[in-house]
Image (spheres, rainbow, N blue to C red):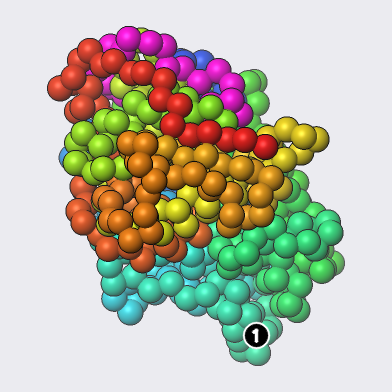
Amino acid sequence: MKNRIRILVTSDVHGALFGTDYANGGFRPAGLVRMKTLIDSLRDENTLLIDNGDVLEGSPILYHHYHVARDEENPVAIAMSMMNYDYFNLGNHDFNYGVTELKKFLSAIHCGCITGNVSYKGIPFGPKYLIRYIAGKKIAIFGITTQYVPHWEDPAHIKDVTFTDAYEFAVQTVKEIKEKDSPDAIVGIYHGGFERNRFTGEPTSDTDENEGYAIMRDIDGLDLLVMGHQHEHAEGVLFGTAFTETRSRAAEIAVHDIDTETMTVTTSIVPVTAETAEDPELLGRLLPYENAVQEWLNQKLGEANIDMTVTDNLDARIHKAPVVTFMNEAIMSVSGAEIASTALFQGAKGLKPVITMRDLMATYMFPNTLVVKKVTGAVLKEYLEKTAEFWTIRDGKIAVADRSLPTHPLYHNYDMADGIEYTVKISNPVGSRIISLTRNGVPVKPEEEFTLAVNNYRAAGGGEFDMIKNAPTVKEDARSIVEILAEYLMNHPHVTVAENENITLIP
């Protein structure tokens, strides 16, 4: 369109190709097959299409590709190649399968990577910034991702990868752009979000995982900051910089229009709806992958003596759900660890009496691997105290603490352990809430040593659990936890799960 430059950005697609709810076979308006139709309706000769990362994790179709059909083409890469993206910015989850697979993906999508603050063997994945001339205007674009990735990722997946602080990189880059190129507009693409409430300025995090607020507050001359990572629907202007962030799974796209006369940035977020048609060419290309995944998900793995579905999110954490007991006991059996601890993730469906791969994928939806750590009784208590920070007392009742509610409960940071018994008094001060800790009824001594099985995210200190990161590693299992649980079920086709009330929460 005349007098307008348009920048379209998707973010946090997480492998969503179709609007399929793989847990129950239902539909939701999302996915790249519909998103392509929406993009085609918004795109013209003065448009750039960019993805802001976190593509390579989060859906059964990707799990199936990497664990069952790795020799086949990556279906998400097929989609993005057919959608003709101009640029791609790395997200933290794009490292989940290692640099080799990431590079293969980047080659297959046929567009440039613009992430400048991440390097592999000293070579940045993208340029410090790039210049595009569109509609007669000079636009500078740079890409950055959160440097917090090493706190979560398996070290083997990011070997020889260096992450530079996103904030510092943005400060230096915008300064250099202004001094050397004097563009008409500067655009930052950031796989990160807000570390402060954008309305009040109050901190929402104690870490530097997200730095979007500081970037906009401190950097003069940044016209647009496109964010992601937090899966939020947000747009507006902060400290003179226009910003957007979209929900995940290709449910909506951020539209940024730059008026070529005033260089004013106007933002909007456009959703995929039930009426958005599937792109017929992309649908035909990807349907065989979808059909193969659906058949794989329907395979029966085993049977349980009880129904372990999750019907009440809060109660499933206050009174440890049987499905958590099952996962912990299976992990202890496979790993040989004395204690196992896991979180019940956001949206986890639980397991029916007849357990399928679909149920398992809908309950443990991340490609985490298993790590066994050696911990002392003192470290174990410190760990449990950290998990107890998830809770507070509100109106006399147990509730999720405010710091765990930036937008939705951070369930992935509340672990529940088996192999021990403990009581949490939530009204006590943070750090003094574990009032009883025993193993087989015997009080745990600070100097005692135990083996503790956790996922690789927690083992790397993810969620600010440095006490686990610093504990010695006993063993690592390169298989995903879903693979471990599936194999356990196939070896134990009839499992008996008892409700284990080993965790007691009291006000």
Q: Single out the residue that lies furthest toward the front.
A: 442
Name the residue rendered at 33%, 36% in the picture. Answer: 440
Q: Is residue 328 left or right of residue 434?
A: left
Q: Residue at x 46, y 17 (%)?
A: 309
Along the viewing direction, whichever of 255 and 498 lies nearer the viewer: 498
Q: Is residue 235 left or right of residue 326?
A: right
Residue 36 versus residue 372 in the image, above or below: above
Residue nearest the viewer, comparing 126 with 278: 126
Residues shaded magenta: 290-317
**Position of 469 compared to 389: left or right?**
left
Report the amino acid beneath label 1: Lys
Residue 358, horizontal then vertical, whole percent: 36, 21
- Image coordinates of residue 430 in percent, x first then y, are 63, 55
Looking at the image, which is closer to me, 152 or 440?
440
* Residue 228 included in the magenta stretch of the image: no
Which quadrant of the view contains residue 67? Answer: top left
Crowd class of label 1 (few under 14; some 14 to 19; many from 20; radius 10 Å) = some
Q: Write down the residue under mark 1.
A: 175
The image quadrant of residue 483 is top left
Q: Residue at x 55, y 18 (%)?
A: 311
Residue 300 colored in magenta in the image: yes
Q: Is residue 115 visible?
A: yes
Local secondary structure at mark 1: helix
Residue 104 in view (yes/no) = no
Q: Image height check: is 342 above or below 187?
A: above
Q: Residue 160: x and y, percent? A: 29, 72
Check the picture and name the quadrant holding the C terminus: top right
Q: Residue at x 31, y 13 (%)?
A: 304
